[in-house]
Amino acid sequence: MLDEDIYRLAKISPDSPLDRLEADIWAGVAASNLAKRTSRVIASFQAGIMVIALVGAAAAGAASATPERATISSAGAALAPSTLLLGTPS
């Protein structure tokens, strides 16, 4: 808004009235401040949603996690490096 006013001011003759220039400048400042406040509120809201999503995902992951027990006779024992190198364990 301020840049537009400066360009418009540069294009007009020096004897033109400048009664709206200050009002336009303050309107631009107010619009800029409103945009900054709005972006801060939106960023805070997004951060809150992200925290809720991460906590929910962590809770869901912790609730569905089942510990696996490794045993010698498990289904993957035939693919273990020691079994492949030394043969079938006795």
Image: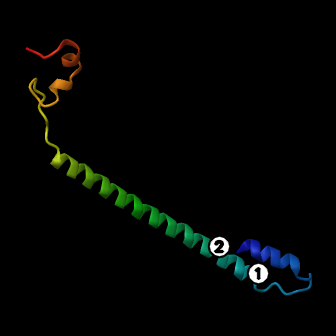
Nearer to me, 36 or 49: 49
Place of residue 79 in the rendered image (x, y in percent of width and height, measured from the top left): 21, 25
Q: Amino acid at mark 1?
A: Leu
Place of residue 24 in the rendered image (x, y in percent of width and height, measured from the top left): 71, 80
Secondary structure type for disc 2: helix
- The reply, left or right, for residue 9 in relation to residue 84 is right
Residue at 36% across, 57% down: 50
Judging by the rendered image, the residue that carries numbered circle 2 is 29
Residue 12: numbered disc: none
Residue 21: numbered disc: 1
Place of residue 87 in the rendered image (x, y in percent of width and height, measured from the top left): 17, 14
Task: Say which label, 1 or 2, has the lower sequence index.
Answer: 1
Q: How crowded is the residue under tag 1: few (<14 C-alpha within 10 Å), some, or many (20+)?
A: some
Rendered view: 21 above or below 70: below
Quarter occupied by residue 88: top left
- The reply, left or right, for residue 44 in relation to residue 33 is left
Compute the Cα span from label 1 to label 2: 12 Å
Residue at 73% across, 73% down: 2
Q: How crowded is the residue under tag 2: few (<14 C-alpha within 10 Å), some, or many (20+)?
A: some
Which quadrant: the N terminus? bottom right
Nearer to me, 50 or 14: 50
Q: Amino acid at mark 2?
A: Val
Quarter occupied by residue 31: bottom right
The colour scheme applied to this rendered structure is rainbow
Residue at 87% across, 79% down: 11
